[in-house]
Amino acid sequence: MNKTKNSPFKLIVILTLVIVATMVALVFANGSTNSTSTTEQTFDKAPSIEGQPILGDPNAPITVVEFGDYMCPACKAWGQDYFPALMDEYINTGKVKFVYVNVMFHGEESILGSLAAESIYKQNPEAYWQFHKELFNSQPTDEHEASWINNDLLLTIANSIPTIDTDKLQNDLVQQSAMKEIEIDKKLVEDYKVEFTPSIMVNETMLEDPFDYERIKTLIEQELDGK
Ligand code: CA
C-alpha cells in the first residue's frame, strides 16, 4: 500500500534531482570554458631573444617579453598605461631587459608595420624604440578595424626621426628585407602558444593577465630573489 502511494512522490523527487544535477553540470561546464581560456603558464625555458630588439641593460638578470601587434588597441593601451612603470622601476634600474616580439594577427598591415620596425632595427637599433612608440601613437583611437598602416604612414614617421635613413627603409620595404626576422617572431608566437595580444612573459612565465601589473612585479621580485 505504502509503496504504491509513494511512487508519484519518488518520481517527482528523482525528476527534480535530475533537473538540478543537469543545471549544476551546465554551470560547471560554462565555468570551466571560461577559466581554461587563459591561465598562467610556465615554460621549460624563456624565449630566445637572439636578434630581437632589447631595451635596457642586455645583461639585466630578468627578461620581460611583450608579444604585441601594432594593430592591437590593447597593446597601445598597455604601452601607455603599464609600460612606463616597468620602465621606471625595473628597466632603468638595470633589473629588467625588455624585448618586443611581433605578433601578426591582423594580416598584411601587422606584417607591414613589423617589417618596417625590424628594418629600422637592422639599420639603427637606437632608432627602433622611437619608431615603435610613434607607430603605436599613430594607431587611430576610433574605428579600430579601419586600415591605417601603409607605406606613406611608415615613411612619414621615419622622416620625423632624424637618425632613420628613410630611403633605405623604403628600399627595405620593397625588398621585404626583414622577412627572416618576421619568420623568427612567427615561430616564437607558435612555440609559446600566444593566443592574444599583448601577451607578457617574465623569464619563463607567461602571465594570465597582461594588465595585472602587481603580478608582473611579483614575478620579477621572485626571480630577483632567486638570483
Ligand atoms: Ca622580432
Image (tube, helix red, strand yellow):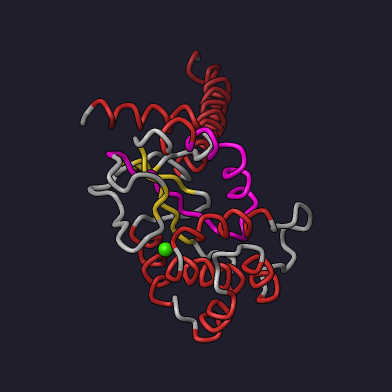
In the picture, measured across the screen, residue 185 lies left or right of residue 76, that is: left
Nearer to the camera, 154 or 124: 124
Query: Where does residue 13 sit, x and y in percent of width and height?
Result: 54, 22
Residue found at x 45% / y 80%: 177
In the picture, measured across the screen, residue 72 lies left or right of residue 187, that is: right
Outermost residue toward the front in this view? 162
> What stretch of residues is rendered in magenta?
61-87
**In the rendered image of this protein, does residue 74 appear above or below residue 120?**
above
Residue 91 counted in the magenta span: no
**In the rendered image of this protein, does residue 150 appear above or below residue 208?**
below
Query: Where does residue 152 sit, x and y in percent of width and height?
Result: 70, 75
Nearer to the camera, 101 or 38: 101
Query: Where does residue 75 sit, x and y in percent of width and height?
Result: 58, 50
Nearer to the camera, 226 or 32: 226
In the picture, measured across the screen, residue 3 lies left or right of residue 149, that is: left
Residue 86 counted in the magenta span: yes
**Ligand 1's quadrant:** bottom left
Query: Where does residue 89 sit, x and y in percent of width and height?
Result: 45, 30
Q: Quadrant of the C terminus?
A: top left
In the picture, measured across the screen, residue 14 lies left or right of residue 43, that is: right
**In the rendered image of this protein, does residue 209 appear above or below residue 226?**
below
Residue found at x 36% / y 68%: 184
Outermost residue toward the top in this view? 2
Residue found at x 51% / y 60%: 127
Nearer to the camera, 106 or 35: 106
